[in-house]
Image: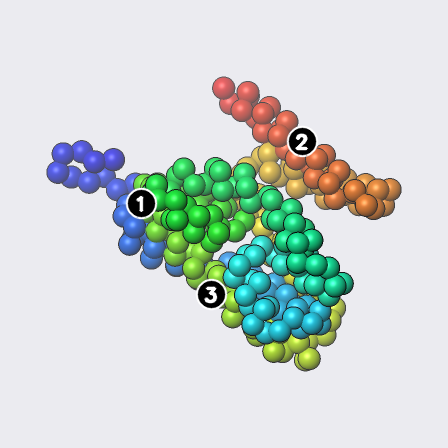
Amino acid sequence: MFSGSSVNYPRYDGVMKPVDFKGGLRAGMRAALGLPTVVLLGSLTGYGALTHDTGFGAGLAVLSTILVWGLPGQIVMSEMYAAGADVLAIAVAVGMANMRFFPMAVSLMPTLAGRNVLVRFAQAQLMSATSWAYVMRASAPETPEARLGYHTGFTCVCVSVAATATLIGYLGAAGLPKPLGLALLFINACFLLLLLLDTRGRGAAVAVITGVVAGIPINMYFPDTGLIITGLVGGTAGFLADGTSRKQAS
């Protein structure tokens, strides 16, 4: 990247990419202040209304967004809390719901600067499916320092917006129709599907399309395990399609 006294900055579509932490931080904040924050405002407002209906306090609702930081896990937490489950059972269920973040963290952490354990844990806690997808895009910074700043700026903006949206949804739950509140929860899932299609290419497209087509009949015949089976079918189809495209390219 560096040649003599001149600096060849990496570019994407003619736009210069940042190479240091501060530049990455600003770029990450700018990237978050767009469609990601709009989606978070919608989906977390719906979650805030849900927590109000399940008996959470306002502080606990906001804290669950900041600490759990994964909408499926947050929904599991609120539903089990309303059902009177004990703390250990809720913790295990939330951990299982957020288990999908493990492979994302394993693939992302080595690309970020810093070997401090606390920094790594903080970045893993801040990471979401949206931030992972954005950092993995071709337009994201390339140097480890800039990637660390990009992920930090992106996630801090997202967490702040999500916590605010949760409080707004909680306080405005009385004026928000329940069907609308539940519908808002699906905005984030739809956005992530489109984002993964943009990020991961052919394999992701095949996985999503296969899952959508196969998911309805599978869940009709296997209502208890249909989601897992659909994921296995769609993921396997995407993996095979991705492998085939790589062989053709080589």
Q: Is 131 positioned to the left or the right of 12 in the image?
A: right
Give whichever of discs 1 and 2 has the lower sequence position.
1
Q: Residues within 10 Å of mark 1 (few under 14, many from 20)?
A: many
Label number found at residue 160 = 3
Residue type marked 3 = Ser
Res 97 visible? no
Q: Which x, y percent locates residue 2?
A: 21, 36
Q: Which x, y percent locates residue 184?
A: 65, 64
Say which quarter of the image contains residue 204.
top right
Q: Which residue occupies the foreground of this view, 218 or 209?
A: 218
Q: Which x, y percent locates residue 32?
A: 45, 58
Q: How many marks?
A: 3
Res 224 visible? yes
According to the picture, the residue beneath numbered tag 2 turns out to be 236
Q: Residues within 10 Å of mark 3 (few under 14, many from 20)?
A: few
Q: Find the distance from the CA under tag 1 to the CA under tag 2.
A: 35 Å
Say which quarter of the image contains residue 170.
bottom right
Label number found at residue 18 = none
Residue type marked 2 = Thr
Q: Find the distance from the CA under tag 3 to the CA under tag 2.
A: 36 Å
According to the picture, the residue beneath numbered tag 1 turns out to be 145
Q: Which residue occupies the foreground of this view, 206 or 134?
A: 134
Give whichever of discs 3 and 2 has the lower sequence position.
3
